[in-house]
Image (spheres, rainbow, N blue to C red):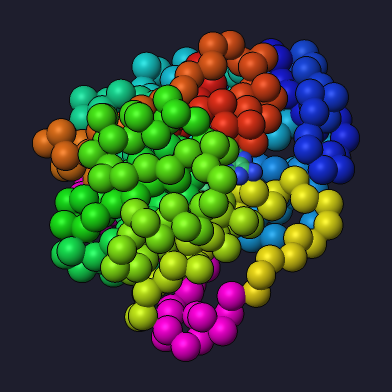
Amino acid sequence: TKQIVLASRPKGFPTLNNFRSETVDVAELKNGEVLLEGMYYSVDPYMRGRMNDAKSYSPPFNLNHPLNGGVIAKVLESKSDILKAGDIVLGMLPWKEKCTVSEKDLKKIDTSIAPASYYLGVLGMTGLTAYFGLLNICKPKKGETVVISGAAGAVGVVVGQMAKIQGCRVIGIAGSDEKTKLLKTEFGFDETINYKTTKDMSKTIGMLCPNGVDIYFDNVGGEISDAVIANINFNARIALCGQIALYNSTDTPMGPRLQPMLLTRSVLMQGFIVSNFKNEFSEGISHLANWVKDGKIKFTETIENGFDQLPKALLGLFKGENTGKMIVKA
Ligand code: NDP
């Protein structure tokens, strides 16, 4: 079977040379295990951090070993009492076309609710990130102004629609006119900003948010955040979800240091990792599933076809090649 390993650790922006494809044997199936064939592979921005040899909440990928991540797979053969051939499962699995895995590391998914790939997106890790980041940290109130960076990505589109459900005014920041148009027409955002073509971000945000920014859901960091924070309101909440603008930085970028504004305006800023909320995941998924079923939350995916496209798809996240969840279909 084919596998994709980490061939070298990137400095700055990763390249395809940091990955290598290999052919290996599939390990023999043991009792309590199933033989899986990957269907949908998730690529996620946090994987960039795992390519470094640095301690973090998620351990580094090992050199010359397969990368791993969220995968939806089909059971081909089973020596498990719980799972049978034909079942569709979700797990943190290696980047291999086929592999044998213990039943304990897999969760069967219900494809009658939504397409299987949604369990990597709106009904999976990124949906839960949106759910807990917005509801538990930002605590939106009706009529408040919510600004979202990385708004057209997997987390961002769900945050925006949830904020609309809570009765907020929602402004999304994204990197192309196609994306900003879609945010308005498909996902119900009130206003949008293309940060790549907007000259004065701070002024534009100020114009679109005449009452100030009550909630900032930050997926990006860097200069976009500087511009949002310059417009932050009294008693605002900021969820630090991601800092993708900085993941490939080789130095420590300096900003205008807006902490005095956070201080004088009594702003609450909190970082979080979605797994902080793992005891409440099933509650989150059931709410998200209901919203998806009722058509209150829509979702979109960018699907790259072919297992070999995994490295390219991962790199594409840092070039804005995806709208909604970036997924590789085997
Ligand atoms: P996305 O689907 O949003 O994909 C990444 C997007 O980021 C790209 O499409 C691109 O959109 C934007 N982007 C890339 N580089 C830059 C840059 N230099 N400046 C501004 N925007 C950039 O990914 P996710 O929805 O999966 O994740 C969004 C964020 O949330 C990430 O930072 C991720 O690390 C974080 N995250 C955090 C979790 C947690 O537990 N805290 C869990 C999951 C995700 P564009 O075209 O708009 O530039």
View quadrant of ligand 1: top right
Vertical position of residue 198 compared to residue 275: above or below: above
The C terminus sits in image quarter: top right
Q: Farthest residue to the left: give it.
A: 294
Give percent across and percent down for residue 219. Answer: 51, 52
Vertical position of residue 63 compared to residue 24: above or below: below
The N terminus sits in image quarter: top right
Give percent across and percent down for residue 88. Answer: 38, 25
Residue 34 visible here:
no
Is 266 covered by the magenta stretch? yes
Q: Which SS type dominates the magenta stretch? A: helix
Position of residue 38 in the picture relative to residue 85 (left or right): right
Position of residue 248 in the picture relative to residue 111 (left or right): right
Q: Residue at x 68, y 66 (%)?
A: 255
Q: Residue at x 16, y 39 (%)?
A: 296
Give percent across and percent down for residue 194. Answer: 48, 39
Give percent across and percent down for residue 130. Answer: 37, 52
* The residue stretch that appears in magenta: 258-287
Q: Residue at x 17, y 51 (%)?
A: 165
Is 224 covered by the magenta stretch? no
Of 308 and 77, the residue lying toward us: 308
Of 324 and 145, the residue lying toward us: 145
Number of residue marks: 0
Quarter of the view holding residue 184: top left
Residue 309 visible here:
yes
